[in-house]
């Protein structure tokens, strides 16, 4: 279809932190919240979804008639990202495209953003600072299951620092984060820049992925909750932590379409992002993931208000954030759509009295270096947000799959039924602040008669 366009590190030395090198943590903290207004969208962009079976010729005619000056076709199904004339009214363009032959629907290419709050930069750290893993009972959990590399979590985010790579187009030098050990990475994709190198140029995605599968018990750095599992890095957010619904939908479809030795290793999709707006395009992709047996886990949002999209969808596990005292973090969204809660942190407090703020600490890019265009400098840095809570739930789900659970609905049921009830939630019940409660993966892993294979 000629009219459619086809579907982005000098090294620094690294010395692992060891117990004999403990010292008081110092840090610089700065706000990282990304605030999107309802209806925020990419200027001049419209998602046009066509009825299955519409011919390329008819699609091109409808795009031209609707006012597209160029377009990019999705790699997954008959949807197109149409670009209209600069300054043209997007709402009017949506109406024009919607009335064209073969068009199922059209919508503005809305925005999503990562749900990270404040950042905190220590000069070194150790496992003892990971109060969050203690809160979810990590050590008891690891006594049962550490994760299997045949089970993967797709992290749709700003990318992951998973490889040493020099981008020939931009000259950017990326470096693999040092504390991955033998963590396995599946081939991913960068939908923000359109290439096969989903490297992190912000730091958020690496932090999220490290909560899931940072190398553990390797005498260096920090731990990940499902450190035996694999990560699929999928970049859908740019260096400002913002991306579009079109790229999120393509990222979801990429993750569920991936096969290896005839199997589909991606069992969980982590969405530490949200939007104040609904997207039919992203919703349809989530529905396809759920239909394929994949558990979709998403951040509730950090505005202290109602749960945002896509965590508000009934077939998505919506995750709220706790502080170190198991109270709902002040920033965490809440409401009937909250399903579970997990540690999200509070960088303004030290309620566990370990001498450092109660952020969630993991390896990631050093943010001051990122601001200088460097992606080769790493730290054990602290963040807070429902973005940080979400990968705890994704990791717990991956451990259940590793244990032998074969059904996404059963994984979700096990996590919800065994969660620690908080607030005024009755036994076996829920409330609108904590949902079903705090995940307790060690309690969920035995299965209790839910769908666990005999293998």
Image (tube, rainbow, N blue to C red):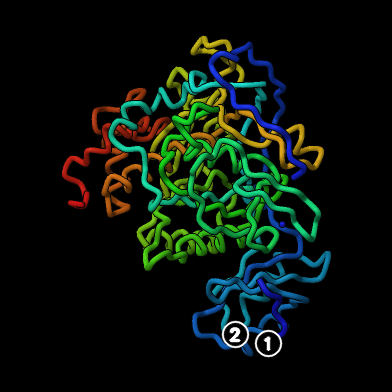
* Image x and y of residue 366, in percent: 70, 33
Q: Nearer the viewer, mark 2 or mark 1?
A: 1
The answer, for residue 118, to whether it is visible in the render is no
On screen, residue 373 versus residue 15, left or right, reads right
Q: Disc 2 and disc 1: Cα gap in Å?
A: 9 Å
Q: Residue at x 52, y 47 (%)?
A: 271
Q: Quadrant of the N terminus?
A: bottom right
* Image x and y of residue 44, in percent: 76, 64
Between 108 and 155, the one lying in front of the other is 155
Q: Mark 1 highlights which residue?
A: 61
Q: Residue at x 65, y 61 (%)?
A: 109
In the rendered structure, are the residues bearing label 2 and label 1 in contact, judged by CB atoms less than 8 Å apart? yes
* Image x and y of residue 97, in percent: 65, 76
The answer, for residue 154, to whether it is visible in the render is yes
Q: Is residue 127 above or below residue 185?
A: above
**Dot 2, how many residues are within 10 Å of its Cα: few (below 14), some (14-19), or many (20+)?**
some
Q: Residue at x 69, y 50 (%)?
A: 238
Q: Mark 2 highlights which residue?
A: 101
Q: Earlier in the sequence, mark 2 or mark 1?
A: 1
């Amino acid at each position: 279809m000629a009219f459619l366009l086809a579907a982005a590190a000098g090294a620094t030395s690294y010395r692992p932190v060891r117990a004999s090198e403990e010292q008081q943590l110092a840090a610089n903290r700065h706000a990282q919240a990304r605030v999107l207004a309802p209806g925020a969208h990419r200027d001049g962009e419209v998602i046009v979804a066509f009825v299955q079976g519409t011919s390329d010729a008819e699609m091109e005619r409808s795009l031209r008639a609707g006012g597209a000056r160029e377009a990019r076709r999705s790699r997954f199904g008959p949807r197109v990202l149409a670009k209209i004339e600069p300054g043209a009214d997007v709402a009017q363009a949506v109406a024009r495209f919607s009335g064209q032959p073969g068009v199922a629907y059209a919508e503005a290419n809305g925005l999503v953003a990562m749900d990270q709050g404040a950042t905190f930069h220590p000069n070194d750290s150790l496992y003892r600072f990971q109060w969050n893993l203690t809160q979810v009972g990590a050590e008891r959990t690891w006594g049962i299951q550490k994760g299997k590399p045949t089970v993967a979590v797709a992290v749709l985010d700003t990318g992951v620092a998973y490889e040493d790579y020099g981008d020939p187009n931009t000259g950017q030098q990326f470096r693999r984060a040092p504390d991955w050990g033998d963590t396995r990475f599946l081939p991913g994709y960068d939908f923000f820049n359109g290439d096969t190198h989903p490297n992190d140029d912000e730091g958020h995605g690496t932090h999220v992925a490290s909560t899931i599968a940072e190398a553990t018990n390797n005498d260096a750095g920090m731990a990940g909750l499902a450190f035996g599992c694999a990560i699929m890095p999928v970049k859908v957010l740019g260096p400002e932590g913002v991306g579009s619904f079109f790229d999120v939908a393509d990222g979801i479809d990429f993750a569920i379409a991936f096969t290896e030795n005839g199997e589909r290793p991606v069992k969980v999709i982590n969405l530490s992002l949200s939007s104040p707006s609904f997207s039919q395009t992203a919703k349809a992709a989530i529905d396809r993931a759920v239909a394929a047996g994949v558990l979709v886990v998403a951040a509730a949002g950090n505005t202290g208000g109602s749960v945002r999209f896509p965590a508000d969808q009934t077939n998505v596990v919506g995750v709220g954030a706790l502080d170190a005292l198991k109270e709902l973090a002040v920033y965490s969204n809440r409401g009937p759509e909250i399903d579970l809660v997990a540690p999200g942190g509070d960088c303004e407090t030290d309620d566990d009295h370990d001498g450092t703020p109660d952020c969630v600490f993991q390896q990631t890019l050093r943010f001051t270096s990122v601001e200088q265009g460097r992606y080769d400098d790493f730290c054990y840095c602290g963040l807070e947000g429902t973005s940080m809570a979400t990968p705890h739930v994704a990791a717990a789900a991956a451990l259940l799959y590793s244990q032998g659970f074969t059904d996404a609905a059963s994984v979700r049921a096990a996590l919800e039924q065994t969660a620690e009830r908080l607030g005024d939630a009755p036994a076996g019940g829920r409330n609108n602040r904590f949902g079903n409660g705090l995940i307790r993966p060690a309690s969920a892993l035995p299965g209790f008669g839910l769908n666990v294979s005999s293998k």
